[in-house]
Amino acid sequence: MNQLQKEVYDNLHIVLGFVSDKKLEDVLGLFPKKAHYYFCSPNIPRALNVDELEEKAKEFDLFGKKYSSVNEAYKYAKENSEKKDIIYIGGSTFVVAEVL
């Protein structure tokens, strides 16, 4: 998040998913409220359900849409972003791995 604060961009798009054993209370407060969120679940047995992620994110004033897969979330982030925007993919390294 420190690096994102140093970047220059028009809009921030965040593709976000976690595993179920992550303490979201410790992590979600680090994310910026002013961003477009694309909630998803990595394709692994330990994945946090996307509905649970969306509900927990609302508690931290993080709002967005749910997607059925990481690739679908990333696809919509790309479609909704402009040249001067940034797309951040994270939460879990499993989410990043699915995009790579």
Image (cartoon, helix red, strand yellow):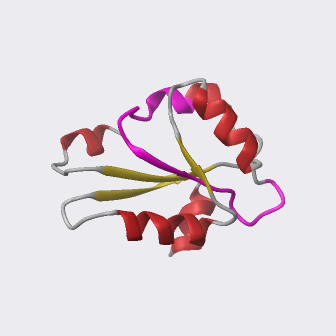
Classify residue 45 by image quadrant: bottom right
Q: Image quadrant for the N terminus? A: top left
Image x and y of residue 23, in percent: 68, 31
Residue at the extreme bottom: 100
For the residue pair 7 and 62, the one nearer the viewer reads as: 62
Q: Is residue 79 above or below residue 39?
A: below
- 37 drawn magenta: yes
Depth check: 3 or 39 in front? 39
62 left or right of 32 in image: right
- Residue, x 75% and y 48% (percent of image)? 48
Q: Residue at x 45, y 30 (%)?
A: 30
Which residue appears at 29% of the width and 57% of the height? Answer: 86
Q: Quadrant of residue 31?
A: top left
Q: Residue furthest left?
A: 8
| Magenta-highlighted residues | 27-46
Compare residues 50 and 18 and report the one nearer the observer. 50
Q: Is residue 20 left or right of residue 82?
A: right
- Is residue 30 covered in magenta? yes
Estimate the x, y position of residue 49 in percent, counting from the top left. 77, 49
Relative to residue 90, is residue 80 depicted above or below? below
What's the residue at 27%, 44% (across, down)?
A: 3
Q: For the stretch drawn in magenta, what is the main secondary structure?
A: loop
Q: Position of residue 14 (x, y in %)?
A: 44, 51
